[in-house]
Image (cartoon, grey):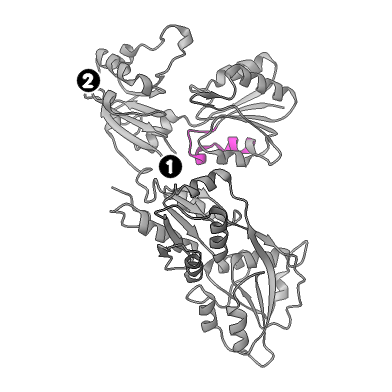
Amino acid sequence: MTVYLVGAGPGDPGLLTVRGAELLATADCVVYDRLASASLLELAPAAAELISVGKAPGRVEMDQDQINATLVDRGADGRSVVRLKGGDPFVFGRGGEEAEALAAAGIPFEVVPGITSAIAAAAYAGIPVTHRGLSTHVTVVTGHEDPAKGRTDVDWGALARAGGTLVILMGVGHIAEIARLLIDGGLAPETPVAAVRYGTRPEQTTARATLGTVADAGLRAPSAIVVGAVAALDLAWFESRPLFGRRIVVTRAREQASGLRARLEHLGATVIELPSISVEPLGIDMPSLDPYEWLVFTSANGVDAFFDRGLAPAGLDARALAGVRIAVIGPGTAAALERHGLRADLVPERFVAESLLEAFPGPADSGSRVLLARAETARDVLPRGLAERGFAVDVLPVYRTTSAEPDPAALAAVRAGEYDAVTFTSSSTVTNFCAAVGPVATPAPLVVSIGPVTSATAVEQGLQVGAEATEHTIDGVVDTLIGLLAAPGDASPAGPRR
């Protein structure tokens, strides 16, 4: 098999290449750095061996010789090994040394380039490293050479005379001396400088200075430092997103959270996933649908469980619904129904059980029956209300919600109040969240609820609901968060901060 030296990019998991994702999906072993986004490891098979070799200030899990030996050892076993490295393996990533070790041992290897922070950090700060009329070339240099060499290979005077754009990586600790050498080499003290810390990550910040002032600008590692005329450009987009820098807790079941998480991250938020529930489909003894006038679903979970588990192993044949009318609560439930090739006959204007009862037509005759497919534990509003309208109602439990085991790091962050808002999309997410977290920090962060039933449960649990989504949908929750947390001046959900 082969050892793949894969660049993970500088932090944003979306910058991983397609080739890198393909290799991770089939890896037997992943040897990884201290990655900015641990979510990349979720792309690997569950059975893959994960080996951390990351370095942090004051802590080294493996030195480079040990990393090389690990790659040779795992590669010799005939397995598919992914060496996942931040940025690009061959841009100050020591990938060349690892390739040399593999070549010397006769281990086949492949290099999968990644996006280097030298380019990406500047781009995410709105700084093009080349720009017509300002810079025709870019030089990437390290500001932290190997101290064991006993010499410097960087001629800062020559770099100053070369002009163009200079990108300095790992140079924060020596920036005062570097700035002095560049000025001595002929660059003006007024030359613009921009330092992008944690580039492409949700905590990205950009500091701007000049060569004459950068020593006193309070730069902090890790930063990519851009020197040259282009550093004065400010084509901001990443840090201008409406929820940039906000930390939002998502409590939906892990199976459902991806859509909400993706939307929030696209708007700039850091998402803390703390799923308080897990959805467990139930085995269904499916009745004949012939006697029923109506089939009612109250959630997307109910739809999926009904159709996917109704007739194991193939699921329910939609032809069994001929002549049965379908009612659902909410557009999310209607969308789930459409994924199974069906359209709802009735969707109430408000997305709560009471609204469905108001919109529900009367029974066609005295024998009209309704099948209500829902969670094992739910409110009795619908079955009781439909029975009062003259229907014979059968309740079919198709799934249950159980408490989820929270991630310890996420749980610790939430208990410490290290977030701006928590979102609740059902009553069960509220009760299980409170059971797992315990008393929330004071002052309590913002609580955003999807609708009145969920809000009532939150109040019963002692939470203060800061806002309730006007439209009781995931989109409504997102729009509410934007309205409450976006910086002043954002005119719309997509409107940039200025």
Q: Quadrant of residue 151?
A: top left
Relative to the observer, which residue lies in front, 73 or 91? 73
**Label 1 SS:** loop
Camera-nearest label, 2 or 1 = 1
**Label 2 SS:** loop
Classify 10 Å Cα crowding around label 1: few (below 14), some (14-19), many (20 and above): many
Q: Is residue 389 above or below residue 97?
A: below
Amino acid type of the residue that numbered disc 1 sits on in the rendered structure: Pro
Amino acid type of the residue that numbered disc 2 sits on in the rendered structure: Ala
> In the visual, does 351 lie left or right of 482?
right
Which residue was labeled with disc 2?
188
Relative to the observer, which residue lies in front, 168 or 388? 388
Magenta stretch?
8-23
Q: Which tag, 2 or 1, sits closer to the chain's start?
A: 2
x, y (%) of residue 241?
37, 48
Q: Is residue 204 above or below residue 307?
A: above
Instruction: Identify which residue is drawn at 42% across, 55% down.
Output: 444
> In the visual, does 28 lie left or right of 217?
right
